[in-house]
Amino acid sequence: MQNPSAFTMAIGTIGPALGIGMIGAAALIGMARNPENSERIQIAMIIAIAFAEAIAIYALVVALILKFVA
């Protein structure tokens, strides 16, 4: 394999990207069905997106380690 760090980033960001899209879609559906709880849904959505984005950051750290150490 030529560049393992690029492969790590490619694979490591697919999951969080799909997860963030699914979180956003579910939150919008929830807000449309129950507008009076939209503030609580939005707070939960932002927290869930932050956790999903952390996984992509872990993939970035692993890719940087592979690039500069291996």
Image (cartoon, grey):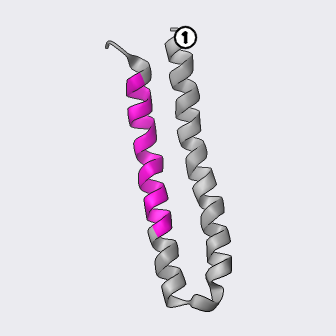
In magenta segment, residue 11: yes
Q: Please tell me how crowded label 1 is: few (under 14), some (14-19), or many (20+) other residues with Cα within 10 Å.
A: few
Residue 22 percent coordinates (x, y): 44, 63
**Taking 22 as reference, is 64 above or below it?**
above
| Prevailing SS of the magenta stretch | helix
Residue type marked 1: Phe
From which residue to which does the magenta span run?
6-24
Q: Quadrant of residue 62?
A: top right
Q: Quadrant of residue 37?
A: bottom right
Q: Quadrant of residue 43?
A: bottom right
Q: How many marks?
A: 1
Q: Secondary structure at mark 1?
A: helix
* Residue nearest the observer in this picture, 52 or 32: 32
Residue at 50% across / 24% down in the picture? 63
Query: In the picture, which quadrant includes the N terminus?
Result: top left
In magenta segment, residue 4: no
Residue 20 percent coordinates (x, y): 49, 57
Residue at 46% across / 80% down in the picture? 29
Residue at 44% across / 31% down in the picture? 9
**Taking 13 as reference, is 34 above or below it?**
below
**Taking 11 as reference, is 32 above or below it?**
below
Residue denoted by label 1: 68
Residue at 68% across / 78% down in the picture? 40
Residue 26 percent coordinates (x, y): 47, 72
In the picture, measured across the screen, residue 27 lies left or right of residue 40, that is left
**Taking 42 as reference, is 5 above or below it?**
above
Residue 59 percent coordinates (x, y): 52, 33
Which residue is outermost to the left?
Answer: 1
